[in-house]
Each structure stands twice: as C-alpha cells, then as structure tokens.
C-alpha cells in the first residue's frame, strides 16, 4: 500500500523546544481561563487520582499543583512524547537570572518526579545539586530523568475510533478508482467505527478527576485532514479541485460523521473512567467563533450535539465555575473564539 501511514503521520508532529516555546507564547494566554478553572476545581475538591486527556504541552494544566499535593496523575495524548517533553520543559522557571525547579519544593518528595534529583536543593535558586541548565533561551534542565510520577500514556481518547478509522485509509484508497468512491467508502468505514471501542489503558471508575480541555475542538481536524491529504496523494490536487463542487457535500458529510463518532467515543471514555460516586470531569470546548473583520459569531458545528451527549451521562455543576464564568471570549489571532468551561458530575453520582 502506497502513501503515508497514519502512525508515521501522527508521529511526525514536531515535538521540540522551538514548537514548545512558541506554543507556550501563543496559547498560554488563550488557555489561561481553562488553567484557572481547573486549578479552582482542584482546590475546591482535592481529587487524588487525575487523568488529563489531550494533555499536549500542558499549557492549561496546573500539573505541579497536582503533583505537590501527592496526586497520582496520568497525562494522555496521542502525539508521541508531547506531554513527556512538555513536562520536562516546564520544570524550570527563570526570572532575572534566578532558576527555580518546580519539583525541588518543600511540599513534596522530588525523587518521585525526577530520577536524577540529588540533594541538596540550593537556595536561593531552588534547584538540586544535579541541575544542568540548557543553553536555550528557554531554560530547562538537561539532567532531568523521568521519575515514577506523572504517568505518560500514548493513546487515542476517542475510544480509539479516530485511530481505527485512520489506519484503514490507505487500504481504502488502494481499492478506490475515484475521489468520490474513496469518500463514499470512508463514510461507510466511519459508520463501522461508530460502535467499536478501544479504551484508553485506564480502569473503569478509576479517576477522581478528569480534564478534557480543548481536546474535542480538535476532533474536527483529525483524522479528516489525514484523509484529505491521502486523497490528494492518490488522485492529485488538481483533479480534486476540478471536481470540487461534487466532492464538497460528501466531504462535509464525512467530516461531520467523523466528528460525531469521535465525540461519542470520547464522552463514553470520560464516563467509563470517572469514579461514579464522587468523581468530576472538567470539560472545555470552543463553542462560538468569529472571523477577522466581522463582529458576528457562528456556532461551531457539532458542539450542541456534543453538549447533549454529555448531558446524557453527566449533570452540570455551576457552583465551582459559576454561569458568568462559563463562557469566555478570547482573541485567537484569526478571529475571536468563545469557549465553554463545564464541570460535570457523572449521573449515577447525583443525589
Ligand atoms: C488544543 S490541545 C489542548 C491543550 C493542551 N493541554 C496543551 O497545552 O497543548 C489538544 C491536544 O489534544 C490532543 N488530541 C487531539 N485529538 C486526540 C485524540 N483523539 N487522542 C489523544 N489526544 C488527542 C492533541 O494532540 C493536543 O495535544
């Protein structure tokens, strides 16, 4: 079978200090609301077992608050190494020539988080005896070695549906004689995956707190973008452009169907993994969007259905995040975005 395999495609997402630095610069201000909402829920409810789905570079996750409080944390993402590296590059803060390591802290045992930790912690810098600053503009410690916490899990958080579908694309392309046929076959393949589940390697009912922060917003992009690239690889971009009018409606159907199966798989996983007695889920997603030079907003396709799906399995709790802080508007460069932040309680946990 010719073409780029899904594993090579997802594995080629650049994970390096440059993309991390740029991500932090661009997205930390945008994700500030998510980060503070998660921090607030954490402080109010003090969960002990936490899973962060789509953890990425951890811009919206107060990971060091979790770890210092002695929590067991699982960071889950499908991009190989993204959260492991994100953790490593987040450890050191530098201010006015002073370094401090986030885990060389009196509140916790640093040996759990870094296998290279060595006493003493040097003040005022608050780094350990093994600290080896990098030469990059963005400070990190070259000596860091992964400890027993947090756990890093490479997994698809849509119950494996995005991956399962994507892994069949090359075979499907090979068996298609036209772009129309390939899209139709993909729609059929997508339907098959609506009932299949490959769960994340986390036990049922095992987590007191799960975060799904801005992850579902990405289900609209992948694996659809991967499919579109393979279509162009097989049939040629020019050919596809020439047939655009006929292909667009069925392409949109595929995109929408793919979003639906992924959100359903994701909601099922959130419910399966959360502790049903008193567990909580923090969920955020982009719900409205504007485009540059327009003041009108449009609703993000599929999100009302997503909220409906959540409501089938969860109740909404507006105490920790009150309604007036649930919707937040941010500038995302190419327009304005309104995100919704929700605290969810699994239905069987309600009194
Ligand atoms: C917008 S980011 C969320 C913010 C993230 N915490 C950060 O700071 O980078 C979405 C993350 O979800 C991950 N993701 C998207 N779809 C996924 C899937 N089906 N399974 C696992 N991770 C996924 C992406 O790789 C990305 O790292």
Image: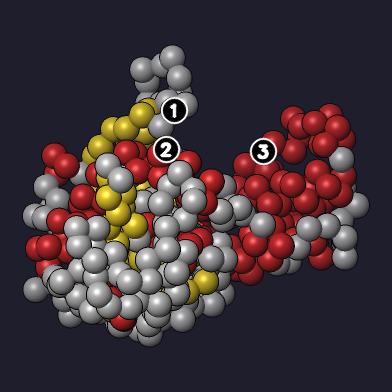
Instruction: Spot the residue most to the bottom.
Output: 203
Q: Is residue 49 visible?
A: no
- Across and down, in percent, residue 158 comes to 49, 65
Residue placed under numbered mark 3 in the picture: 249
- Across and down, in percent, residue 252 comes to 62, 42
Secondary structure of the residue carrying numbered label 1: loop
Instruction: Spot the residue most to the right.
Output: 177
- Across and down, in percent, residue 260 comes to 50, 56
Check whether the beta carbons of the residues at disc 2 and disc 1 lie within 8 A of each other. Answer: yes
- Across and down, in percent, residue 298 comes to 40, 29
- Nearest the viewer among 324 and 32 is 32
Check whether the beta carbons of the residues at disc 2 and disc 3 lie within 8 A of each other. Answer: no
- Nearest the viewer among 91 and 204 is 91
User: Depth-wise, is mark 2 or mark 1 nearer the camera?
Assistant: 2
Residue occupying image coordinates x 15% and y 72%: 107
Check whether the beta carbons of the residues at disc 1 and disc 3 lie within 8 A of each other. Answer: no
Answer left or right for 42 relative to 197. Answer: left
Answer left or right for 153 relative to 188. Answer: left
Secondary structure of the residue carrying numbered label 2: helix
Name the N-terminal-most of marks 1 and 3. 3
Residue placed under numbered mark 1 in the picture: 333
Instruction: Spot the residue most to the top.
Output: 293
Name the N-terminal-most of marks 2 and 1. 2
Residue occupying image coordinates x 40% and y 80%: 115
Residue placed under numbered mark 2 in the picture: 26
Answer left or right for 241 relative to 269. Answer: right
Answer left or right for 181 relative to 111. Answer: right
User: Residue 27 is drawn in which quadrant?
Assistant: top left
Q: Is the residue marked by circle 2 packed among few (<14), some (14-19), or many (20+) residues within 10 Å?
A: few
């Amino acid at each position: 079978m010719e073409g780029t395999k899904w594993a090579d495609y997802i594995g080629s997402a650049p994970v390096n200090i440059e993309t991390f630095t740029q991500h932090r610069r661009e997205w930390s201000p945008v994700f500030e609301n998510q980060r503070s909402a998660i921090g607030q829920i954490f402080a109010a409810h003090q969960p002990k077992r936490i899973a962060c789905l789509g953890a990425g570079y951890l811009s919206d996750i107060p990971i060091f608050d979790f770890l210092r409080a002695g929590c067991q944390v699982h960071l889950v993402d499908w991009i190989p190494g993204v959260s492991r590296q994100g953790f490593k590059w987040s450890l050191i803060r530098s201010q006015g020539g002073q370094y401090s390591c986030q885990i060389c802290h009196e509140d916790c045992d640093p040996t759990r988080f870094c296998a290279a930790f060595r006493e003493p912690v040097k003040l005022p810098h608050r780094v350990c005896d093994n600290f080896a600053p990098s030469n990059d503009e963005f400070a990190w410690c070259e000596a860091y070695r992964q400890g027993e916490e947090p756990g890093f899990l490479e997994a698809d958080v849509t119950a494996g549906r995005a991956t399962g579908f994507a892994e069949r694309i090359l075979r499907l392309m090979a068996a298609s004689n036209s772009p129309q046929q390939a899209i139709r076959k993909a729609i059929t393949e997508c339907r098959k995956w609506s009932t299949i589940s490959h769960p994340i390697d986390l036990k049922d009912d095992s987590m007191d707190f799960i975060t799904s922060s801005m992850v579902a917003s990405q289900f609209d992009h992948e694996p659809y973008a991967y499919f579109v690239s393979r279509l162009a690889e097989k049939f040629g971009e020019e050919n596809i452009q020439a047939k655009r009018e006929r292909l667009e409606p069925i392409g949109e159907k595929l995109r929408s169907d793919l979003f639906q199966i992924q959100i359903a798989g994701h909601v099922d996983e959130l419910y399966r993994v959360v502790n049903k007695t008193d567990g909580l889920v923090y969920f955020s997603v982009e719900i409205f969007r504007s485009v540059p030079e327009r003041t009108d907003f449009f609703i993000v396709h599929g999100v009302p259905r997503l909220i409906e799906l959540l409501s089938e399995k969860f109740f909404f709790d507006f105490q920790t995040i009150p309604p007036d802080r649930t919707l937040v508007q941010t500038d995302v460069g190419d327009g304005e975005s309104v995100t919704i932040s929700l605290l969810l309680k699994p239905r069987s946990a309600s009194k």
